[in-house]
Image: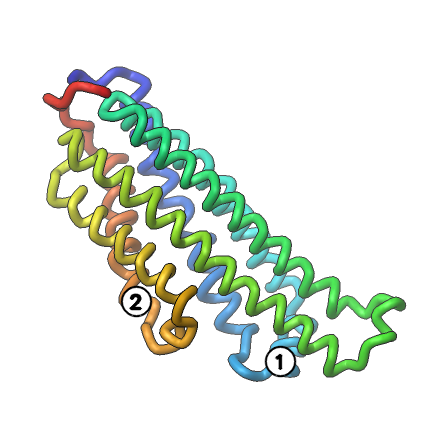
Amino acid sequence: MAIDESQAKAAKVVGFTYLFALIPAIFAEFYVRAHLIVLDNAAQTALNIVGHQRLFRLGTASNLTVFAVDVALITALYVVLKPVNSRLALLAAAWGLIETTILVVVTLNDLDVLRILGGAHYLQAFQVSQLQALARLSVSAHDTTYNVALVFAGLRSTTFCYLWFQSGYIPRVLAAWGVLASFLMGAFAFSFIIFPGLARAVPVEIYGGPIFVFELTMGFWLLFKRLRPSGVTGR
């Protein structure tokens, strides 16, 4: 199967978005939250957020940037891989859009934290400790909702990586790594929903590291290499 111009351009978009999204995602989920969120200490977490509202808002805005870029990524992946298997590509895209919608809800939870700690007059009906507990509840909802989104992210990425493998557009070793890394991410996220204690016991590097390496590698490969013609006929 020959590579047409739209696929070639979409592949470059995929490569760019993989790399571009990593920067704000790491900033929001690792730098900002590591500096502001204190595990099992609602009072200190609230004080950190109130004292560093701009940083918290930057983290939220960074996440929104990632989610917007994700829509471009999912669309571009669909364009590249639709000729391989249109039904699977559409299914993967649908899972990806569900994932992104859930992640937008994460952002709404984050904005709730700022409203709860905003000092509005109507909040005087609550004690300070109650407001801090409510804020910490919204912060925890971020993690829980994120795990739900990662389940759909795993489904989306596993399916797209399977199509990469089937197509032969990229080295099959890289595509197989993507299938494994994507499945690992989604499986762990699903297990965290059933067994929440695992989320604290399992380091993020275990289930996040492989997909990070895959997306970083894919980003550079698609930007600087051409897709290989495939012998696969579309369905």
Q: Nearer the viewer, residue 63 or 52?
A: 63
Residue 39 x, y percent position in the rendering: 51, 80
Quarter the C terminus occupies: top left
Q: Residue at x 60, y 64 (%)?
A: 55
Q: Does residue 150 appear to the left or right of 145 in the view shown?
A: left
Q: Does residue 46 appear to the left or right of 22 in the view shown?
A: right
Q: Earlier in the sequence, mark 1 or mark 2?
A: 1
Q: Which mark is residue 205?
A: 2
Q: Name the colouring of the figure.
A: rainbow
Residue 46 x, y percent position in the rendering: 66, 76
Q: Nearer the viewer, residue 18 or 123?
A: 123
Q: Which mark is residue 42?
A: 1
Q: In the figure, 61 relative to 54: above or below?
A: above
Name of the residue lying farthest toward the front = 194
Mark 1 is surrounded, within 10 Å at the Cα level, by few (under 14), some (14 to 19) or many (20 or more) other residues, namely many
Quadrant of residue 123 within the rendered picture: bottom right
Q: Residue at x 42, y 58 (%)?
A: 26
Q: Amino acid at mark 1?
A: Ala
Quarter the N terminus occupies: top left
Q: In the figure, 205 relative to 234: above or below?
A: below
Q: Secondary structure at mark 1?
A: helix
Quadrant of residue 15 within the rendered picture: top left
Residue 109 seen in this snapshot: yes
Q: Residue at x 30, y 31 (%)?
A: 88
Q: Secondary structure at mark 2?
A: helix
Residue 13 seen in this snapshot: no
Residue 44 x, y percent position in the rendering: 62, 82
Q: Amino acid at mark 2?
A: Glu
Q: Which mark is residue 69?
A: none
Mark 2 is surrounded, within 10 Å at the Cα level, by few (under 14), some (14 to 19) or many (20 or more) other residues, namely few
